Image: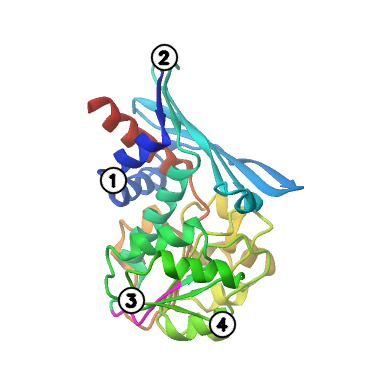
Amino acid sequence: MTTIINQKQIKSIVKDIDVVAAMKEGFVQYSNQNTMVPPVGELLFNNPKGETHIKYGYIKEDDYFVIKVASGFYGNVKFGISTSQGMMLLFSQKTGEPRGILLDEGLLTDIRTAAAGAMVSQYFAPKKIKGIGIIGTGIQAKLQLQYLQRFYPNISVWVWGRDAENTKKFKNQLGECEIKIASSTTQVAQNCNLIVTTTPSEIPLLKEEDILEGTHITAVGADTENKQELESALLQKADIVVVDSISQSKTRGEVFRALKDGFITQANVVELGIAIQTPSLQRKNDTQITVADLTGVAVQDIMIAKAVYKKYMNN
């Protein structure tokens, strides 16, 4: 029998799940080669602008495999519809039978990405946070900040967005903390040493010359070969460059662009699941510049879909 779980039910369930811990376990399983995760499938649209990603796979000797379809259509705001859409399909790894349909409308993708960003900060952000910088004002920007604030409460926040009205809305919606609106990404970089970039930009937004000593940047927006939020020279300047997937970094994301531009080599890059198991590969002091390039890996979808399904079935 296939169980259908709607978004309202998912929102209630996910509150009781430690998604940050689930992401850590997933990345370790992935980097330890205990998963089967094929290359990402994607459809890119121009009229209107949008994209659909198909990510799927399984953890070896587990009970389930997952197929996730997630879309981002940026013009949806005009219609009062979320820019994120999609669902996760959970199947028995023993029989192939469909066990769960999670009608999350992209919610779980957004949450697992934000939780991964928060998890990364625990290993690569400096101990003394001067300010948190958020580049972007969409759903992911909000969630990244909310998850970071679980670990870094009462830290001033700087936000930059292309649209002034959306930036004001961002500030008003997250009014429980001190948020300053930046006039440029440079102003964010000059006031923050923990920065998250969350946009679908195809031109670099942060430049090497703007970054303070000791800054950590988590870049989550560039998940196709055409997107880029960080100047390639910035990755060359970084002391540590981490990716969630070495194989995916060869076809998409900030590392892909920096490799293509000749600013770094594959030897400069370490995979996240290895780094979090190896203290010598993590931040050593508050002067290092670190970059985490997260393009999103199917193991994250497996972990969160499985957790939600199990929680629902046990209630």
Residue drawn 48% across and 57% down?
Answer: 140
Which amino acid type is shown beneath numbered disc 3? Answer: Pro
Identify the secondary structure beneath mark 2: loop
- Please report whichever mark, 1 or 3, sits nearer to the chain's N-terminal start: 1
> Distance between the Cα atoms at labels 1 and 2?
30 Å
SS assignment at label 1? loop
**Is residue 1 inside the magenta stretch?**
no
State which mark lies toward you, 3 or 4.
4
Compared to residue 40, the image places residue 75 above or below, namely: below
Badge 3 is on which residue?
Answer: 126
For the residues labelled 2 and 3, say whether their Cβ atoms are less than 8 Å apart.
no
| C-alpha separation, residue under disc 1 versus residue under disc 3 | 28 Å
Amino acid beneath label 4: Ser
The front one of 230 and 190 is: 190
3D distance between C-alphas at marks 1 and 4: 34 Å
Q: Position of residue 282 (x, y in %)?
A: 34, 67
* Labelled disc at residue 183: 4
Q: Residues within 10 Å of mark 1 (few under 14, many from 20)?
A: few
Residue 15 — which label?
Answer: 1
Q: Residues within 10 Å of mark 3 (few under 14, many from 20)?
A: many
Q: Quadrant of residue 10?
A: top left
